[in-house]
Amino acid sequence: MEEAILSTVVLGFLIGLTGALAPGPTLVATINASLAGFLTSAANPYFWIWWLSVGSALLISSLEGGLILAVAFMAGHWGADTAWFTFVSTGVAQGKTILSDTTYHRIMMACGIFLIFFGLYYLAGPLLSR
């Protein structure tokens, strides 16, 4: 239980650093956007779940075909991630030009509130199942 509390505090700290819920620029975002992206990815529990389960199994399978296949797998995977996140970030940037500032901020606030409630539901799940 103490590990869960500690990891939640660390995750909250990383989210605060990267500015996931902040309305303006944060310290990390103003210093280095790449560092902010790295910390955001590192704070994402699904990143770790995927790489410790499916991702590692796929990587080990590709290593059976040799180092070149493993490198090709990683390059393809990272390329697909880059393409997807470029598509999403471009959509958000273009959406901001189409929507008024008020509408854009309301949508972002609704998404943030949804994520907060989802996180609380996720954290409360073990407590409610007792």
Image (cartoon, rainbow, N blue to C red):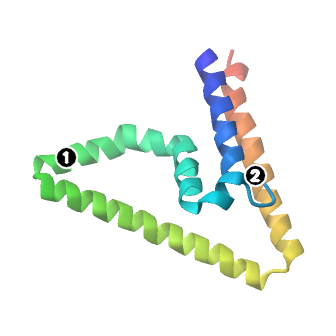
Q: Is residue 64 left or right of residue 56?
A: left
Secondary structure type for disc 2: loop
Q: Earlier in the sequence, mark 2 or mark 1?
A: 2
The numbered disc on residue 21 is 2
* Residue 30 vertical placement versus 117 (above, below): below
- CA gap between label 2 and label 1 equals 38 Å
x, y percentage for residue 122?
Answer: 67, 34
Tell me if residue 66 can be seen: yes
- Amino acid type of the residue that numbered disc 2 sits on in the rendered structure: Leu
Q: Which quadrant holds residue 44?
A: top right
Outermost right residue: 102
Mark on residue 7?
none
Label 1 Cα neighbours within 10 Å, binned few <14 / some 14-19 / many ≥20: some
What residue is shown at x 76% (from left), y 50% (from top)? 114
Mark 1 highlights which residue?
Answer: 61
Residue type at the position of mark 1: Ser
